[in-house]
Image (cartoon, helix red, strand yellow):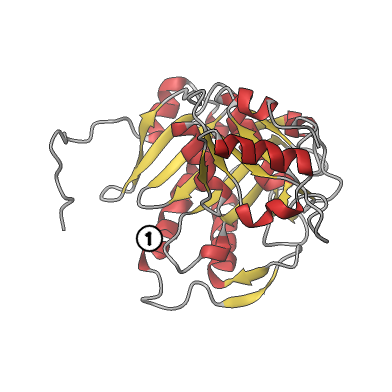
Amino acid sequence: MTPLPLPGDAAIAAPTLEAHLAARGADPALSALARAIAHAAVPIASRLALAALPGDPARVVGSNDSGDRQKALDRAAHEHLLEALARADVRAVVSEEAVDEIPLHPEGRFDVAIDPIDGSGSIGIGAPLGLLFCVFEAGETLQRPGAEVVAAGYISFGHSTDLGLSFGAGVDLFTLEPASGHFRLVDERVRIPENKPMIAYNASNTGHWPAPLRDHIETSIAAGANMRWIAAAVGDLHRILLQGGIFLYPADARKGYENGRLRLLYEAFPIAFLIEQAGGAATDGTNRILDRTPTSLHQHCPLIFGDRKMVAAIPRH
């Protein structure tokens, strides 16, 4: 079936991910690693598009280190990505779906932290989902400072499959062309649009927030800011890179939420790296995310990111 043509549509001629990285003169080993993850995302996107036709991707098959229910697609995506990373120059991997660091090649040049399916609570209902990863030069452990991240990226699985990627010289955006299986360049060195009053947060949590933070958000909404909430951080990350605004998932007073809920190593670090590369900011409500060092592989943290000025205006808490 051919795609629906729209007025103004033209033949697709945008550079592929491979051609773009080659033209940029990117590090060959790092490029190969990024391509391995991007190519591995294509069958994940295809399986998501089938929903429950061949089976139930939301079937609970266990739980991860944080006690979250692990779904069939979580597990399958994790194993699929490990196979892809095993073909790259990778020493070790930390994944949300594995308790311990996973060794691959002892002499590998890179270490990778990855969340195979971000927002997996929404698997099976057609909502946007994602994949997050960050890359370090190989070391003795992946409990490394955020300042040592050398590359990061995401895949956003929505009505399009989009890739955001940075090797530390800005963020480039690509979209999957399903017919060819290639990711093609959409925009390069993107900058977060400024002064766009959009705030992504889970409104059901605000009663547990510190009063100054709650008051600030309520005042912003009353002044005309729009509320957004995709329930997958990757979806809001992709939207903020394109449309501006901020995202908040702060710590709150509930048991188990005192230190936030997103994982520092494989969620907050890649998001913070990408956001800063696009001119924004990412904090835990007090400190810059990339100044932190994980004390455990699956450590939680609060996360606020987006437009630099809007982040700076958030009361410290």
- Which residue in the protein does label 1 denote? 46
Residue type at mark 1 is Ser
Vertical placement of residue 96 versus 313, above or below: below
| Residue 313 found in image quarter | top right
Q: Is residue 266 left or right of residue 171?
A: right
Q: Is residue 103 visible?
A: no
In this view, the residue in front, 102 or 195, is 195
Q: Position of residue 208 (x, y in %)?
A: 76, 54
Q: Position of residue 279 (x, y in %)?
A: 57, 22
* Residue at 75% in and 30% down: 288
Vertical placement of residue 174 versus 92, above or below: above
* Residue at 53% in and 30% down: 28
| Residue 303 found in image quarter | top right
Q: Position of residue 252 (x, y in %)?
A: 78, 51
The N terminus sits in image quarter: bottom left
* Residue at 62% in and 77% down: 61
Q: Position of residue 124 (x, y in %)?
A: 46, 69
Q: Number of numbered discs present?
A: 1
